[in-house]
Image (cartoon, rainbow, N blue to C red):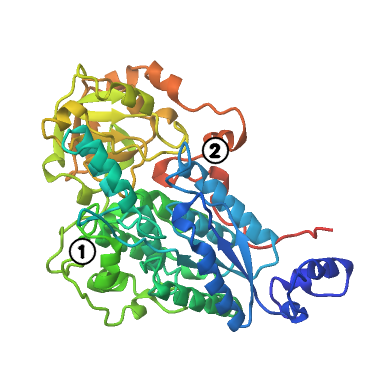
């Protein structure tokens, strides 16, 4: 037999080889074990992850491509995380999903893997796993859903939920109309059709070089996605034969390209914690400051919700990711490879913009500088971030008195109290929502605005939080504040009435009180009462070992790679 990894299981005449082969003979012919590459299909299809529910169909196309190329495809269901369903937050289990997938890939007789993901945490967790086990791996993003419409107007998943729900609270939209729009929003299979985290991570998987070029952004119902899945199955066999692993593909230049792409597409802030975590598994030196250094001055070229007007189906029609990247090709690392073995820039060719309303040219961007801004100050010594493309320009430099909430329950209980001492210049502060505190760092940073201000026409305020916000959300939100309040960060000592100063241009977020006074304060008792104290299970392991958002919120013992070797037999 060949020198394939799977031959460690299947090669030979002894009892163990007999067992490994015999138990796999459920329709597989004998020559399935004669040295053919065994390709796992890490499949996150699940009815409880509705955005990924179509991935079984995609897996069938991958299988056909693997067979055609002379490999053996093997469906491997892995942990699936549904963003819209899981409580308290899907982010709590991203690291668990990565760890479980890594161990299943390492422990099974497979030579390579095709990673099928779509919903927000699935592609990040799969890439983290692939980086740690370092088997030849390639991603097939599940793709966005088609655009739904309500009364003739396109609806953006997530973004329009936030917008319409605020209109109801402002008294400008009836609850009946709001509920009527519910059946119109989700038109087809696929993940969110705005530039939320799912769309962002699918596109960044391609910018990193981990997809068959030209795949990311294909709508989920598009037959071309199945054709690309078939081609990806063929490519996975080739990657095994040539020994092309994540450690060969993913380099410092790959992450540079992803950061440039993140800014140009107006991608989700969640990409920051995911890219940091993936880099950490590879040992690639990537820091929070790199997002600002590389991406801050990159122009926003994609006019897509939440930063713009259009939806993912329009982006594909207008030329897709390659048309965007060609506009910023001079900012890309020309040496960064893809899973094809060729550099990313080689695949851009003469990609054209077919609709300049959706994809802007470099000379006429939506915003001239739209990348993630990294803030520091006495409120965020280890950093915080803001997405200028989703913020209000008039609030990018702002001073206001803090209105502090010690938990999400506190926010819900008091936000709409008519007696709440708040005005449009106030800064809403929500704490206890970081990785340790909630636990899991939920998407609550884009706090709803007080009802009495909504009724006065206010639609944005400065908000500060140690949690995350949905990639579909918008507003002037300072998030990922590190260290988080539950880890002793300064956010735990801010009091209502303290002046908060936001200065995005100078990359500052501060509470304007003497440092000695801030240091001398005790943490809020209500905050300490609200933070997570799990007694058992994954939550306890997570809270005891999770690192800060500024490094990707991975578990400290999962950073790095263990490779694919397994020392001992199973019998």
Question: Is disc 1 placed on a helix, strand or loop?
Answer: loop
Q: Along the horizontal axis of the image, is 472 left or right of 62?
A: left
Chain-order first, disc 1 or disc 2:
1
Q: Residues within 10 Å of mark 1 (few under 14, many from 20)?
A: many
* Numbered-mark total: 2
Residue at position x 43%, y 72% from top? 225
Do callouts 1 and 2 mark residues in contact (Cβ within 8 Å)? no
Q: Position of residue 122 (x, y in %)?
A: 48, 55
**Spatial CA span between label 1 and label 2:** 38 Å
Quarter of the picture holding the C terminus? bottom right
Q: Position of residue 399 (x, y in %)?
A: 15, 31
Q: Position of residue 489 (x, y in %)?
A: 38, 30
Q: Is residue 80 above or below residue 548?
A: below
Q: Quadrant of residue 381?
A: top left
Which element type, helix, strand or loop, lies under badge 2?
A: helix
Left or right side of 84 for 179: left
Q: Quadrant of residue 60?
A: bottom right
**Residue pictured at 39% horizontal, 18% vertical:** 526
Residue closer to the observer: 89 or 498? 89
Category of crowding for the residue at label 2, using alpha-carbon neighbours closer than 10 angstroms: few (below 14), some (14–19), many (at least 20):
many
Which circle marks residue 147 in the picture? none
Residue labelled with disc 2: 542
Q: Is residue 466 visible in the rendered structure shown here?
A: yes
Q: Residue at x 20, y 64 (%)?
A: 301
User: In the figure, residue 421 lies in which quadrant?
Assistant: top left
Q: Residue at x 57, y 57 (%)?
A: 561
Residue placed under numbered mark 1 in the picture: 301
Q: Is residue 282 visible?
A: no
Residue 319 horizontal/vertical position (percent)? 26, 73
Where, quadrant-wise, is the N terminus in this rendering? bottom right
Q: Is residue 58 left or right of residue 376?
A: right
């Amino acid at each position: 037999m060949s020198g394939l990894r799977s031959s460690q299981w299947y090669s030979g005449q002894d009892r163990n080889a007999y067992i490994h082969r015999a138990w796999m003979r459920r329709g597989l012919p004998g020559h399935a074990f004669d040295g053919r590459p065994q390709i796992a299909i890490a499949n996150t299809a699940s009815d409880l992850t509705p955005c990924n529910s179509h991935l079984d169909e995609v897996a069938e196309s991958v299988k056909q491509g693997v067979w055609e190329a002379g490999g053996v495809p093997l469906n491997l269901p892995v942990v699936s995380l549904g963003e819209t369903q899981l409580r308290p937050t899907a982010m709590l289990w991203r690291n668990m999903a990565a760890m479980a997938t890594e161990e299943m890939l390492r422990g099974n007789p497979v030579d390579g893997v095709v990673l099928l993901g779509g919903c927000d945490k699935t592609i990040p967790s799969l890439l983290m796993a692939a980086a740690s086990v370092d088997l030849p791996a390639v991603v097939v993003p599940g793709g966005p859903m088609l655009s739904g419409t309500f009364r003739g107007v396109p609806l953006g998943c997530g973004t329009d939920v936030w917008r319409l729900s605020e209109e109801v609270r402002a008294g400008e939209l009836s609850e009946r109309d709001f509920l009527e729009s519910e059946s119109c929003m989700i038109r087809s299979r696929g993940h969110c059709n705005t530039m939320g985290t799912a769309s962002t991570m699918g596109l960044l998987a391609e910018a990193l070089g981990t997809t068959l070029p030209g795949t990311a952004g294909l709508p989920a119902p598009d037959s071309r996605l199945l054709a690309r899945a078939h081609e990806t199955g063929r490519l996975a066999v080739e990657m095994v034969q040539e020994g092309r692993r994540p450690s060969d593909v993913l380099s410092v230049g790959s992450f540079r390209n992803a950061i440039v792409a993140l800014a140009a597409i107006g991608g989700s802030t969640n990409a920051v914690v995911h890219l940091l975590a993936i880099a950490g598994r590879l040992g690639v030196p990537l820091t929070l400051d790199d997002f600002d250094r590389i991406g801050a001055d990159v122009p926003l070229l994609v006019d897509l919700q939440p930063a713009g007007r259009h939806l993912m189906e329009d982006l594909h029609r207008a030329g897709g990711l390659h048309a965007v990247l060609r506009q910023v090709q001079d900012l890309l690392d020309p040496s960064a490879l893809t899973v094809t073995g060729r550099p990313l820039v080689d695949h851009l060719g003469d990609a054209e913009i077919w609709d300049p309303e959706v994809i802007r040219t470099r000379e006429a961007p939506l915003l001239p500088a739209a990348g993630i801004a990294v803030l520091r100050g006495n409120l965020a010594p280890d950093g915080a971030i803001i997405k200028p493309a989703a913020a209000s320009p008039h609030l990018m430099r702002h001073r206001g008195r803090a209105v502090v909430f010690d938990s999400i329950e506190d926010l819900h209980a008091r936000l709409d109290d008519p007696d709440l001492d708040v005005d449009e210049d106030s800064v809403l502060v929500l704490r206890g929502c970081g990785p340790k505190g909630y636990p899991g760092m939920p998407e609550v940073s884009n706090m709803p605005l007080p009802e009495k201000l909504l009724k006065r026409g206010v639609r944005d305020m400065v908000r500060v939080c140690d949690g995350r916000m949905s990639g579909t959300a918008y507003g002037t939100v300072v998030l990922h504040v590190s260290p988080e309040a539950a880890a002793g960060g300064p956010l735990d000592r801010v009091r209502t009435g303290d002046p908060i100063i936001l200065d995005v241009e100078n990359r500052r977020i501060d509470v304007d009180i003497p440092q000695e006074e801030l240091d001398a304060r005790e943490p809020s008792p209500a905050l300490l009462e609200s933070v997570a104290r799990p007694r058992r299970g994954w939550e306890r392991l997570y809270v005891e070992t999770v690192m800060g958002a500024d490094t990707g919120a991975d578990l400290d013992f999962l950073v790095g790679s263990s490779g694919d070797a397994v020392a001992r037999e199973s019998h």
